[in-house]
Amino acid sequence: MSGECLACALMAGRAPLPGGTVLRTEFWVVEHCVGPLGLGTLVVKPARHLLHVADLTPQESAELGPLLRKVSAAVTEVTTPEQVYVCLWSHAGGVPGHIHFVVQPVGSEDMARFDAFGPTLQVAMGEAGCFPRAAEVERVCQRLREALRSGPAGV
């Protein structure tokens, strides 16, 4: 897999993806984050390899807002956080990579544990390198799939 885009490898099944695909639409894929951002953190990424938001088609753009709302609602329902962060990530090794939106549940226990919030919390979680166990990810992904099926319409 050296040199291959991790986001593309995960979608194609060439890299391990605990929880599997949570949701796939015509233009977007939702998966559990494979990084150390906590249980229930999802990634929303274009199904095609894109480096810039400016390169989204009108159809991809039209689907994005309602999808982020729907995914955020499902994360809120399943994890009951104080807040759900939604942010764009793109760089891999300092080079623009496959864009993806991180949808991360954050609670007071996360902020207390890392003595941080916002981007500083994400950096601290990354530095700590605490990855959820695969079995936990599988369980939360099943619950998230159910919440997405019954959640707000629009995508």
Image (cartoon, grey):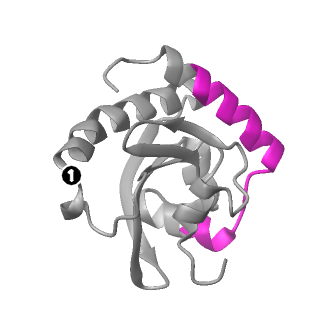
Tell me the chief SS of the magenta region.
helix
Say whether residue 49 is left or right of residue 138. left
Residue at image x 40%, y 64%?
49
Q: Position of residue 54 (x, y in %)?
A: 18, 63
Residue at image x 57%, y 46%?
31
In the depicted structure, whether residue 82 falls above or below residue 11: above
The residue wearing badge 1 is: 57
Q: Position of residue 41 (x, y in %)?
A: 56, 46
Of 37 and 71, nearer the camera is 71
User: In the structure shown, which secondary structural element does the residue marked by tag 1 occupy?
Assistant: loop
In the depicted structure, whether residue 53 falls above or below residue 90: above
Residue at image x 43%, y 27%?
73
Q: Quadrant of residue 136?
A: top right
Q: Which residues are magenta?
A: 124-146
The N terminus is located in which quarter?
A: bottom right
Residue type for callout 1: Thr
